[in-house]
Image (spheres, rainbow, N blue to C red):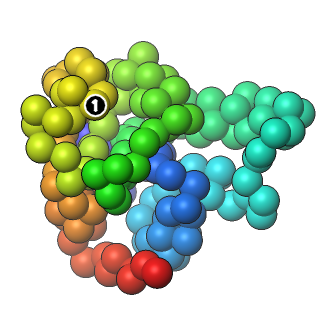
């Protein structure tokens, strides 16, 4: 993983986590994911989807030094995040996965990528942030 001052973190999660990422970025987490700033997330709009993936996500991923994947609930299913994870794996980017899933369940749910040498797992976001070098950040309460 990159040294703390040089770190550029791409965050990956359900769209519902946008307020969380905006709050953590305001506290100093160096998030470079521009998708968290979209006023209305892309739904059923091909032109907007092309712009999202080709003009925002792909360039942000190329600039990132680390990826932080967050799964709040065991039942949260990833969709677009799986493509983002694949892109990160292709670039051999260090991945920090914060998830409540145990090792066997993670492997069954997500496949072999979760056991790759560039993937590290934490059982919660607070632990993941501390591992990344940001133990002082406060995780906002959610509704």
Is residue 43 at least partly visible in the picture? Answer: yes
Q: Residue furthest front?
A: 75
- Residue 14, placed above or below residue 59: below
- Horizontal relation, residue 92 to residue 64: left or right: left
Element carrying mark 1:
helix
For the point 40% across and 49% down, the residue is 76
Determine which residue is flagged by label 1. 109
- Horizontal relation, residue 113 to residue 10: left or right: left
x%, y% of residue 117? 17, 24
- Horizontal relation, residue 29 to residue 51: left or right: left
x%, y% of residue 49? 78, 35
Query: Looking at the figure, which quarter contains the N terminus?
Result: top left
Depth check, front residue: 2 or 49: 49
- Residue 26, placed above or below residue 45: below
Is residue 133 at least partly visible in the picture? Answer: no
The quarter holding residue 121 reads top left
Residue density around tag 1, few if under 14, some if 14–19, many if 20 or more, within 10 Å: few
For the point 73% across and 53% down, the residue is 41
Depth check, front residue: 128 or 107: 107
For the point 23% across and 67% down, the residue is 126
x%, y% of residue 14? 50, 52
x%, y% of residue 10? 47, 46
For the point 30% across and 28% down, the residue is 110
């Amino acid at each position: 993983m990159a040294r703390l001052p040089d770190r550029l973190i791409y965050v990956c999660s359900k769209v519902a986590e946008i307020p969380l990422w905006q709050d953590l970025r305001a506290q100093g987490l160096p998030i470079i994911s521009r998708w968290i700033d979209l006023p209305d997330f892309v739904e059923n709009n091909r032109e907007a989807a092309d712009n999202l993936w080709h003009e925002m996500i792909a360039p942000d991923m190329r600039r990132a030094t680390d990826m932080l994947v967050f799964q709040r609930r065991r039942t949260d299913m990833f969709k677009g995040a799986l493509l983002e994870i694949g892109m990160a794996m292709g670039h051999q980017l260090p991945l920090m996965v914060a998830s409540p899933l145990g090792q066997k369940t993670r492997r069954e749910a997500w496949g072999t990528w979760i056991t790759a040498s560039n993937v590290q797992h934490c059982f919660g976001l607070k632990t993941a942030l501390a591992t990344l070098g940001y133990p002082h950040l406060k995780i906002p309460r959610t509704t």
